[in-house]
Image (tube, coloured by chain):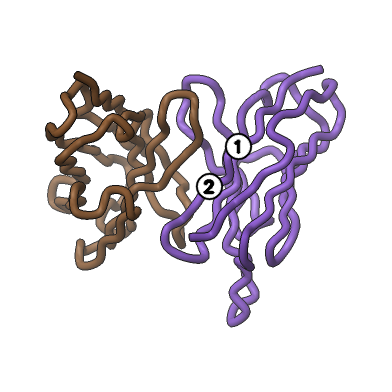
Amino acid sequence: EVQLVESGGGLVQPGGSLRLSCAASGFTFSSHWMSWVRQAPGKGLEWVANIKQDGSEKYYVDSVKGRFTLSRDNAKNSLYLQMNSLRAEDTAVYYCARDGSDWFFDLWGRGTLVTVSS
Amino acid sequence: DIVMTQSPDSLAVALGERATINCKCSQSVLYRSNNKNYLAWYQQKPGQPPKLLIYWASTRESGVPDRFSGSGSGTDFTLTISSLQAEDVAVYYCQQYYSVPPTFGQGTKVEIK
């Protein structure tokens, strides 16, 4: 089955760190750009970051630059998001998404909730 | 960043009637070298992740019913549901992928009248 499964979310204090993982299956993971998209509770969608097939290019939304780091392991069909210096405004469901032939998203995971609160 | 503005924020349509959602981009998302509009539409039902409906402004994703159609060019786009079904109750988002960062509209909630 073609799917993405996120893990690693949870409750963390402001200033803390968390590492999200996304396990891909059912397709050739190494052939696709991959993204993280987040959705704050009751709010809309916000693209966070993406990474090229071989990991040589990465892009981030300004609000997470210098705090979040995206990486991938094609041998393990996995995508990772290291989140440091977390803020209350980072609270959201984080979705792993596969980039289509361009930077639209044709496959989504079910998401993992990150809550930043003291 | 390209700002995406959807209208209306919500609409209620009777079953079997047409639903129309508009999306306006703060700058053109038409790439002239290939004549493609870098615009996608998504459907998000409660408690579910978004689902891709339309890309390149008017190309339906595989498996999407043909009652969903996309149109427009440049800065103004429309998603039309030709005959609303109960299962179409959802929030719909447009997204541009013309430039980094990819950005989404604020969403339009579609309900049954």
Q: Residue at x 72, y 64 (%)?
A: B73
Q: State the image quarter where residue B87 is shown.
A: top right
- In front here: A8 or A4? A8
User: Does B83 sit above or below residue A79?
Assistant: above
Return the chain for callout 2: B
Q: Amino acid at mark 1?
A: Gly
- Residue B27 occupies which quadrant of the picture? bottom right
Cα separation between marks 1 and 2: 8 Å
Q: Which mark is residue B104?
A: 2
Q: Amino acid at mark 2?
A: Phe
- Describe residue B45's horizontal placement relative to residue A37 as left or right: right
Q: Is residue A34 visible?
A: no
Tag 1 subunit = B
Left or right of B87, for residue A74: left
- What residue did someone put label 1 on? B107
The residue lying toward the viewer, choosing from B49 and B67, is: B49
Q: Look at the numbered discs 1 and 2 and tell me whether their residues touch, using CB distance below 8 Å.
A: yes
Percent x, y for residue A93?
A: 35, 29
For the residue labelled by badge 1, is the local secondary structure a helix, a strand or a loop? Answer: loop
